[in-house]
Image: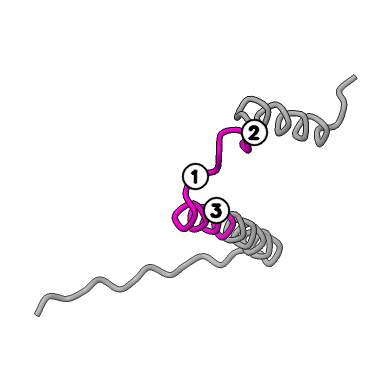
Amino acid sequence: MSEQPAPAARQQLEPDAAEGLRAYAARTRESADQLAAVLEDIAANGLPAVEDCTPWEELREAHLARLAAQRPAVA
């Protein structure tokens, strides 16, 4: 039999870092669930009519405006 190397000891995170990582995982999981719901809806009902969709340029501009509003103003 071949011997398996012993697994390396893991370095524990600081409690604040671990909590931040858990929060990021929760946000990522929520986003993935939303995407999965949209894809399931498309699979079940087909693509929406073009007239009912928002052009990606408008979505981009709205997102950039939200990001700009979150940044503190620089003097």
**Residue 47 vs residue 3, the one in the foreground:** 47
Single out the residue that lies furthest toward the bottom.
1
Residues rendered magenta in the picture:
32-54
Q: CA distance from mark 1 to mark 3?
A: 10 Å
Classify the position of the C terminus by image quarter.
top right
Residue 49 part of the magenta segment: yes
Q: CA distance from mark 3 to mark 2?
A: 15 Å
Which quadrant holds residue 29? bottom right
| Residue in the image at 55% along x and 58% along y | 37
**Residue 18 point in image, percent of width and height:** 63, 64
Regarding mark 1 in the picture, which secondary structure is present there? loop
Q: Label 2 is placed on what type of residue?
A: Thr
Contact flag, marks 3 and 2 (Cβ < 8 Å)? no
Which quadrant holds residue 61? top right
Residue 64 part of the magenta segment: no
Q: Residues within 10 Å of mark 3 (few under 14, many from 20)?
A: few
Residue 29 horizontal side relative to residue 72, left or right: left
Which residue has dot 1 on it? 47
Which residue has dot 2 on it? 54
| Residue in the image at 9% along x and 80% along y | 1
Regarding mark 2 in the picture, which secondary structure is present there? loop
Which residue has dot 3 on it? 38
